[in-house]
Amino acid sequence: MSFPLELVQTIRAVKDVAVLTGAGVSAESGVPTFREAQTGLWVRYDPQELATPEAFRDNPSLVWEWYAWRRELIAKARPNPGHYALVDMEQRFPSFALITQNVDGLHQLAGSKAVINLHGNIQLTKCSQEGILVEKWEDTGVIPPRCPHCGGLLRPDVVWFGEALPPGAFNAASQAARRCDLFFSIGTSSVVEPAASLPYLALEHGAVVVEINPSETPLTSAATYAFQGPSGQVLSALVEAVWS
Ligand code: OAD
């Protein structure tokens, strides 16, 4: 795969880089995305039934079991070359921020350090009443399990539709998008706000924006560069082209 010389030179010259990733980065690890035809989770399941506070209120055991199923799926997944290419890139710039919408923890597992989890982490569990993280609870067979402190229902520590993002996460992500010289948008359909606004924030502040996605998205026409391909392959080829 070849890349425009101008982009290669830009990547070699810039000091501050921000990356936004979506479910597509984990697709090559076997983790389903949300909106892809046939295989997407939101094509096969109704997000309103599974990923909203109302869904959890109305049917907490269904929501808990669905996330338990996703946790098991993700537990078998391993980072792919795209995750590792981002770990490599993190070492190459004085300032680097990896903003992820993913809750699978694969960036951290691959070794990324500067990760901003916009939508939480599916491996973590919190009390739905107190909002605090809970690591251990009595397994009474009741689903969802109860908080050992207050008896409230436990829930996954992920953002549901209509919920606020973790405090500070979006501020940190916006700051990174504003200050960067180069912004990558990788493996996201660019439709879920507020994450989808980040590449435009970077563009407004003069950054070069690079999109990597096998399909077109609403961002594609606005991006400075758009590479249509799987992120595992494109990112590995880009690292090779710039730093080998
Ligand atoms: P989507 O499922 O909406 O989009 C996945 C994107 O990945 C699509 O644009 C695919 O074309 C692309 N893709 C597929 N395979 C790929 C590959 N090998 N390499 C690169 N890209 C690939 O997932 P997100 O954009 O992440 O919200 O969805 C955003 C949010 O909506 C998620 O964080 C989740 C969901 O509801 C919460 O959990 C709050």
Image (tube, helix red, strand yellow):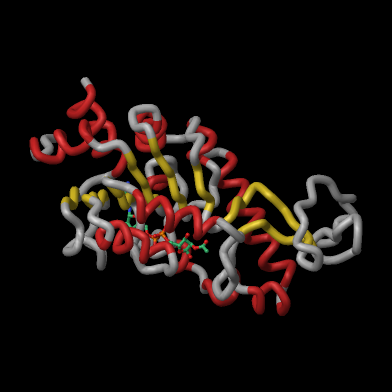
In this rendering, would 188 be left or right of 203?
Answer: right
- The residue drawn where x is 32% and y is 50% is 186
Q: Nearer the viewer, residue 23 or 166?
A: 166
- The residue drawn where x is 62% and y is 46% is 72
Q: Which percent across, then down, holds residue 119?
A: 54, 58
Asked if residue 23 shows in the view, the reply is no
Which quarter of the rendered picture does the C terminus lie within?
top left
Q: How many marks?
A: 0
- The residue drawn where x is 36% and y is 46% is 18
Q: Nearer the viewer, residue 182 or 134?
A: 182
Q: Which percent across, then down, holds residue 136?
A: 83, 46
- The residue drawn where x is 86% and y is 50% is 137
The relative height of residue 183 versus residue 114 in the rendered view (above or below) is below
Q: Which percent across, then down, holds residue 180?
A: 33, 48
The relative height of residue 42 versus residue 18 in the rendered view (above or below) is below
Most distant residue in the left direction: 5
